[in-house]
């Protein structure tokens, strides 16, 4: 069951991309009206939960995030769909939030009882857009690492979906180069 303290701003948001199905649990930001026809953007409660965990290191949020994602995986996808691997989209290894993504992946695998494929792809250290175009955002950890997802139904988790570029690149490599059978995506929030 999702954390009752997390009030969602609306229904899940359908995501479209290089995957069989995709959903964002909630919006990352919302607009609050102010007097005199003005407004201000603030993070939604779910947006705050994911942001604080990833960027501020608020580790007490991990259990609420796992409960929220686990609840939605159980309700958004077909009941007869059996995920064979789970991967959380990683930031570059040098980033401080990398460790938190690994913790999230392990906790989700335990909660959902899905084997991990974390580490199949690593995020390249990208300096600019030209470099990203040339070398790609992600690379396989080893020649054999793609075999972990080959022919498998994979649940890909992204904590905060912004433009979708990194998720698209990640899924393209899993589908086209590692030959994953199906990719299904759940994002915590969408900006």
Image: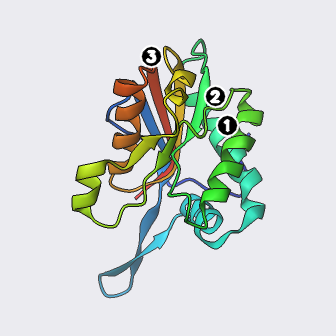
What's the CA distance linking mark 1 and mark 3?
22 Å
Q: Which residue is mark 1?
A: 70
**Residue 99 location in percent, x, y?**
67, 58
Q: Residues within 10 Å of mark 1 (few under 14, many from 20)?
A: some
34 or 121: which is nearer to us?
121
Image quadrant where one finds the N terminus: top right
Element on which disc 2 rests: helix
**Residue 93 location in percent, x, y?**
56, 58
161 or 104: which is nearer to us?
104
Residue 174, relative to residue 95: is it above or below?
above
Q: Which residue is mark 3?
A: 181
In the shown orientation, is residue 78 left or right of residue 66? Answer: left
**Residue 163 location in percent, x, y?**
32, 54
Farthest front residue in view = 143
Residue in view at x 72 percent, y 60 percent: 61
142 or 130: which is nearer to us?
142
Asked whether the residues under the numbered discs 1 and 2 touch, taking CB atoms below 8 Å apart as contact, a structural biologist would say yes
Q: Which residue is mark 2?
A: 74
76 or 188: which is nearer to us?
188
What's the CA distance linking mark 3 and mark 2?
20 Å
Query: Which quadrant would residue 34 be assigned to in this image?
Result: bottom left
In the shown orientation, is residue 122 left or right of residue 45? Answer: left
In the shown orientation, is residue 64 left or right of residue 183? Answer: right
């Amino acid at each position: 069951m999702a954390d009752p303290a997390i009030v969602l701003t609306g229904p899940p948001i359908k995501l479209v991309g290089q995957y069989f199905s995709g959903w964002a649990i909630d919006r990352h930001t919302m607009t609050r009206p102010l007097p005199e026809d003005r407004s201000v953007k603030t993070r939604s409660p779910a947006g705050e939960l994911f942001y604080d965990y990833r960027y501020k290191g608020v580790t007490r949020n991990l259990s609420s995030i796992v409960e929220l994602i686990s609840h939605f995986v159980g309700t958004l996808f077909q009941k007869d769909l059996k995920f064979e691997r789970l991967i959380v989209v990683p930031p570059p290894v040098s980033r401080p939030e990398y460790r938190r993504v690994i913790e999230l992946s392990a906790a989700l695998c335990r909660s959902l009882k899905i084997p991990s494929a974390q580490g199949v792809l690593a995020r390249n250290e990208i300096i600019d857009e030209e470099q990203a175009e040339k070398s790609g955002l992600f690379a396989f950890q080893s020649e054999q690492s793609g075999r972990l997802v080959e022919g498998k139904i994979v649940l890909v988790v992204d904590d905060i979906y912004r433009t979708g570029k990194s998720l698209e690149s990640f899924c393209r490599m899993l589908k086209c180069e590692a030959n994953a059978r199906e990719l299904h995506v759940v994002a915590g929030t969408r900006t």
